Amino acid sequence: MEELISLCKRRGFIYQGSEIYGGLAGTWDYGPLGVALKKNIEQLWWKRFVLDREDMYGVDAAILMNQEVWKSSGHVAGFADPLVEDLKTKKRYRADHVLEAQGIDPKGMSFADMDKVIKEKEIKSPEGNPFGEVRQFNMMFKTQIGAVEDENSISYLRPETAQGMFVNFKNVVDSFHPKLPFGLAQIGKAFRNEIAPRDFIFRVRELEQMEIEYFVKPSLWEESFEHFRKESKEFFKEIGLPEDKVHELEIAPEDLAHYSKRTIDFEFDYPFCRKELSGLAYRTDFDLKSHSAGSSIDLSYFDESEEDKEKKRFIPHCIEPSFGVGRAILAVLSSAYAEDELGGEKRSYLKLAPEVAPYLIAVFPLLKNKSELVLKAREVFDLLRKIPQFAGRVIFDETGSIGKRYRRQDEIGTPYCVTVDFDTLGENPEHLDTVTIRDRDTGEQKRIKIKELEFLKN
Ligand code: GAP
């Protein structure tokens, strides 16, 4: 992890949030290459789950929502982590993490159970002090809307994007009249006041989610659940995650969230341990029912295809595939990070899938001080970046020795380096208008015609 965090900072992927002021825990800023990687992952997700389908509707809901939304969804009452305080230092810890550190599995334990175990086993804080009671700590960031601060002006930064879709269910039905099954999809920020943010971008306070709320006839939920289980795995493959590092975990009934009847977590072998990458939940009709009751707006669905009159109007059930963008990025980066020896030199590089790498191709003139090489290399660069599939994914680099430039591109995961040399200019007439193309992983170089570079589109 340390090597990876250092590479991310050095090469402009991810920086600590508010770094020049000493940072702000649980926040991270994406630099130019981090943004490119993130956008590539988000675009692949959006293409797979929205653009390539006829049953999906994209939305982009406001982050601030009426506080009633969070009362109906259950977040005001129950979106809490178990908090325990060191009585001397007043430092706060997650009680479940405290138990895990002692080798005790907190799965299925209520807050009272955790309290009991901490007391019975006389577990102390890392500083060696006694702990207070295990308490509920609501993770939503509370804020005030407008100039008057009172109970009515309370709002929250959304802790999940999901509710933005449930409250727009009726809008989308009224505008588009979709037939069941259909889904709403959204990519956006969410905020959680995590007691213990940690492990780089794994557990943060400001995060990004890619979520789908997929509405189905109640009797057909299993079909869609299976469909999204498969699609999730396909998506992980597409972004380059090794299949043997992705695992499914069936959540035990006693550990299910209040809205879920079934949940599978996809876990990933991160460098620090196996942890949740994304989730797939069967949320039943919990949310639409709660919002119908809370808003007094009827959120039932009229199913014209249903023969039985009694069954024509009902509240659809919901399947929710929920992906954390940061966790996907960390999985991609950590599994791509590699070290080896090339040409007698040690190197670290990112074996990123071409689909997600910030740049696909780097173009170099062999020497910076030969204007004819630079001009020709610029020509190749311009030619490539005008190809729509390569837009924004080609970089020109003329700084430093060619070896250094290769290493730099290896470290940021660029799959191909194209070099314009004297042969390109016709020094060897047989090789006129050819370039060398170097493979990031093997370091092998081939000479090909400039025209043939288009093959990289595939
Ligand atoms: N709408 C359902 C929902 O939000 P969740 O399991 O709480 O479910 C979904 O979160 C995903 O969001 C997780 O699988 C994870 O990828 C990501 N996530 C949740 N909390 C996070 C945090 N503090 N930091 C980074 N990612 C987080």
Image: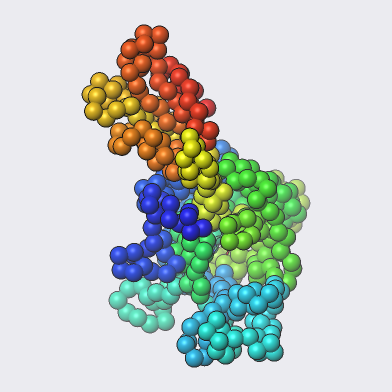
85 relative position to 258: left or right: left
Q: State the residue in front, 432 or 268.
A: 432
Which residue extends farthest front? 344
Residue 408 in view in this figure: yes
- The image quarter containing residue 26 is bottom left
Q: State the residue in front, 227 or 451.
A: 451
Residue visible at 29% across and 28% down? 367
Q: Where is residue 78 in the image (x, y as percent from the top left)?
A: 58, 76
- Note whether 193 is above or below 40 in the view shown: below
Residue visible at 30% across and 33% down? 398
The colour scheme used here is: rainbow
- Note whether 377 is above or below 70 in the view shown: above
Q: State the residue in front, 41 or 318.
A: 41
- Note whether 418 is above or below 16 in the view shown: above
Q: State the residue in front, 46 or 28.
A: 28
263 relative position to 9: left or right: right
Residue 51 in view in this figure: no
Q: Position of residue 36 (x, y in %)?
A: 41, 45
Residue visible at 42% across and 82% down? 151
Which residue extends farthest top? 429
270 relative position to 60: left or right: right
Q: Where is residue 3 in the image (x, y as percent from the top left)?
A: 48, 55
44 relative position to 279: left or right: left
Q: Where is residue 369 in the image (x, y as percent from the top left)?
A: 23, 28
Residue visible at 36% across and 16% down? 423
Q: In which quarter of the image is ligand 1?
A: bottom right
